[in-house]
Amino acid sequence: MKLLFTPVLISVVVLSIMYVWGGLPAFLITLALAVLEITFSFDNAVINARILEKMPLRWQQFFLTWGVLVSVGIVRFVLPVLIVSVVLALSPSTVAVLIFTEPAKYAVLIAAAEPAIKAFGGTFLLLIALRYFFNEKKDVHWFTIIERKFASWGQLEAINIALALSVLLLVAILSKHQSEIILESGLFGTVLFIAMEGVTRALGVEAKNVVHSGVAFFLYLSVLDMAFSLDSVVGAFAITTSVPVIVAGLGIGAYFVRTLTLMLVRGGTLKRMLYLENGAHWAIFALAICMFVALLTPLPEWFVASIGVMLIFFAYLSSKHVLVYELGDVGSGSSEEKSVL
């Protein structure tokens, strides 16, 4: 609980500043954006925790402090600027200036670039989820029948890439008028995923070099955060065009998500909660599918945000159920394995 003191203190200070600066409306919108960020990135915290477990303590602290600046400053604003500039053929400097001089116009531009953002994010996140499920070495299954079958398919080389590109192609065909930008953005997401996999290996993710592995994992987490943040950025500009309010709200949310990640690691939660990682990847899968579906028909923000939280919650309940059985077995001297689903 000590880890929560700093984010709570920062939240109180920032929300107070926003209230003094913009009154009750600025306060409420900042709070809403913080909740939006936490909700959209809750599954990200679980995935990050699994990676953060392998990082040295110094890099874990770096992830919580300086990583927030990377997350809010670069991931949540530089990336959308680049996407908008590429999609709409504008210079990055022009788009960046609009954020601060004409935020309402920038909100219109980012809305116009939304198909590219969703195609990119959907493809990247789908690849992350499929890589986890299509792994023949995976031996912990929540939805046993489905996940065991997926794990057996892991013997097929690059099956996750083949399936993700197939989904991308199908959505591009069905979208008709936006097919070109959807394909281009989805392919860019695929290239980034492949490059990310290669970079983490090249920098020594499996090696014992602490510095190299710390850098590799930090880059890996930053790219993951980038994909998870896309929907919250689009949602933020749909709520308000005030840049200070957006920075404050998303910043509070990002810091809470990182704190939650460290709490999961230092509390050993993933080791006790057997299916939490499975639930997080199902949430990623659901978010990716929602991004693709949103390219064809509008989806309510509350639905997209809540489906991931619900999956992780049910995974938590299933994990608690198994934990209770295991504790009971220890007390009775039984060692029989228990299954929930």
Image (spheres, grey):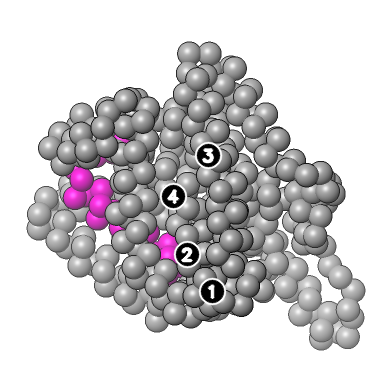
Secondary structure, mark 2, is helix
Q: Which residue is mark 3?
A: 189
Q: Which residue is mark 2?
A: 218
Sequence-earlier tag: 2 or 4 = 2
Magenta extent: 238-260
Which quarter of the picture shows residue 264?
bottom right
Residue 29 rendering spot, x and y as whole percentages: 25, 47
Q: Nearer the viewer, residue 50 or 8?
A: 50
- Above or below: residue 187 compared with residue 142: above
Q: Separation of disc 1 and disc 3 at Cα? A: 25 Å
Secondary structure, mark 1, is loop
Quadrant in which the N terminus appears: bottom left
Q: Nearer the viewer, residue 15 or 54?
A: 54
Drawn side of residue 259 relative to residue 331, left or right: left
Secondary structure, mark 3, is helix
Sequence-earlier tag: 1 or 3 = 1
Q: Separation of disc 3 and disc 2 at Cα? A: 19 Å
Q: Which residue is mark 1?
A: 55
- Residue displayed at 54% across by 26% down: 183
Sequence-earlier tag: 3 or 4 = 3
Which quarter of the picture shows residue 334?
bottom right
Quadrant in which the C terminus appears: bottom right
Residue 27 rendering spot, x and y as whole percentages: 20, 53
Q: Separation of disc 1 and disc 2 at Cα? A: 9 Å
Q: Amino acid at mark 2?
A: Phe
Q: Amino acid at mark 4?
A: Met
Per the picture, the main secondary structure of the magenta-coloured stretch is: helix
* Magenta highlight on residue 252: yes
Q: Within 10 Å of the Cα at label 4, are there few (<14), some (14-19), or many (20+) other Cα atoms?
A: many
- Residue displayed at 27% across by 28% down: 90
Q: Amino acid at mark 1?
A: Met
Q: Which residue is mark 4?
A: 226
